Image: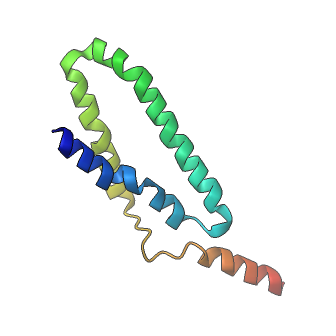
Amino acid sequence: MLGAFMFAQGFGPGAHIMSYASLGFPTSMRGVSIGFNQAVLRLGSTLTLFFFPILSSGLGTHVYWVILAAPVLGLIALLAKRWEPVGFDADAEERTRIETKSRG
């Protein structure tokens, strides 16, 4: 089970979380978006480290239903949004804005 967990962490969303911030924002905003992404990621990790023992002592073994619900809610959000950064030109809107500004 530990090996399966390590495989899932190394090849799952944890390893690829920075791809969405890198591909989804134009170059002028990319550094801020990656920083914000890391801040949210680390805040979530810190809150989990603090609240999991409290939740575990309150719910006992039912805490695993909460752990199961977290990725399911994420999957539902992704399926509802249906956004794929591959093939998306994040800099196109910024280039259009700059070209329009330089003309007028």
Instruction: From the top left corner, tell me how far across and down residue 92 is, in percent.
Output: 60, 78
When the figure is inspected, residue 60 is found, relative to residue 22, above or below; the finding is above
When the figure is inspected, residue 58 is found, relative to residue 82, above or below; the finding is above
**Quadrant in which the C terminus is drawn:** bottom right
Give the colouring mode of the picture: rainbow
Q: Nearer the viewer, residue 16 or 51?
A: 16
Specify the quadrant of the image occupied by residue 99.
Answer: bottom right
Q: Nearer the viewer, residue 47 or 8?
A: 8
The residue depicted at 75 percent of the width and 82 percent of the height is 100
User: In this image, 103 relative to 56: left or right?
Assistant: right
The residue depicted at 44 percent of the width and 21 percent of the height is 50
User: In this image, 48 relative to 12: left or right?
Assistant: right
When the figure is inspected, residue 56 is found, relative to residue 9, above or below; the finding is above
**Quadrant in which the N terminus is drawn:** top left
- Extreme residue in the left direction: 1
- Extreme residue in the bottom direction: 103
Q: Nearer the viewer, residue 9 or 102?
A: 9
The residue depicted at 30 percent of the width and 55 percent of the height is 11
- Extreme residue in the front direction: 3
The residue depicted at 18 percent of the width and 45 percent of the height is 4
- Extreme residue in the right direction: 104
Q: How many marks?
A: 0
Instruction: From the top left corner, tell me how far across and down residue 28 is, in percent.
Output: 68, 66
When the figure is inspected, residue 19 is found, relative to residue 70, above or below; the finding is below
Instruction: From the top left corner, tell me how far across and down residue 19 is, in percent.
Output: 46, 61
